[in-house]
Amino acid sequence: MKIDKSLPLEYRTEENQLKILGFWLFLGAEIVLFSTLFAVYFTLWQRTGHGPTASHLFELKGVMIETILLLTSSFVCGLAIHSMRLGFKKPTLVFLIITLLLGLGFLGVEIFEFITYVNEGATLQTSAFLSSLFVLLGTHGAHVTFGLLWGIGIIMQMKREGINEITANKTFIFSLYWHFLDVVWIFIFSFVYLKGLM
């Protein structure tokens, strides 16, 4: 296995480089998935039937809290990668834990938001608009949940094995995934919530 010491730790072996390339290809498929969900939402967003509309449901305060939590978690995840590249295990682990706690906070607010919607009579069966909304938000939330579990696994492995080519590669790929979820949320915030509040 050829090792290039001039590259960051996560890129040093050919296998690691191929894993990162493969993950970029996976993210391409994820873009197609979310693009499809956005297309369905934009097609159905005015088909509210007798159910509540976006302007009746959405509240800026909760959405802003979710946005701040997720954007901050993405920034902290970047700090974890920077610490990892410097070889600082403890700060890397601390930043990863903070990233996951912020992600958990985001998920908690989103679940509370869903419960509020259901209490106001907004369910998957109420209208085409709400079906598309719940599927879009639920898919993103499921991805965040998976990211939390994945992140816990990486933290456990790095705590046990330290920073090496394997843990660095896994952590970097996790960071790509987490930043991707952040970008998707920016689109949700801008084109679902802000548009719905207008």
Image: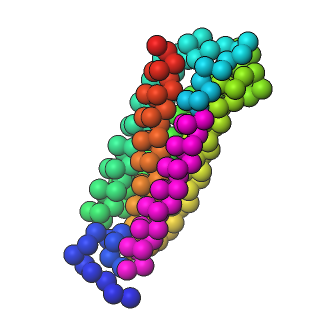
How does the figure colour the protein chain or chains? rainbow
Counting from the top left corner in percent of width and height, residue 180 is at 44, 48
Depth check: give the residue in front, 63 or 160.
Answer: 63
Tell which residue pokes out farthest to the bottom in this image: 1
Depth check: give the residue in front, 154 or 74.
Answer: 74
Counting from the top left corner in percent of width and height, residue 22 is at 47, 68
Vertical relation: 140 (above or below) 52? below
Residue at the spot 29% in from the left edge and 63% down from the top edge: 85
Quadrant that contains the N terminus: bottom left
Counting from the top left corner in percent of width and height, residue 155 is at 49, 58
Depth check: give the residue in front, 10 or 118.
Answer: 118
Q: Is residue 146 visible?
A: yes
Let me know if residue 35 is in the magenta part: yes
Quarter holding residue 56: top right
What is the magenta range?
Answer: 14-40
Let me know if residue 183 is in the magenta part: no
Q: Main secondary structure of the magenta part?
A: helix
Quarter holding residue 190: top left
Residue at the spot 37% in from the left edge and 80% down from the top edge: 14
Quarter holding residue 126: top right
Depth check: give the residue in front, 91 or 77.
Answer: 77
Q: Is residue 69 visible?
A: no
Counting from the top left corner in percent of width and height, residue 129 is at 65, 24
Vertical relation: 129 (above or below) 50? below
Left or right: 181 in relation to 136: left
Residue at the spot 47% in from the left edge and 53% down from the top edge: 177
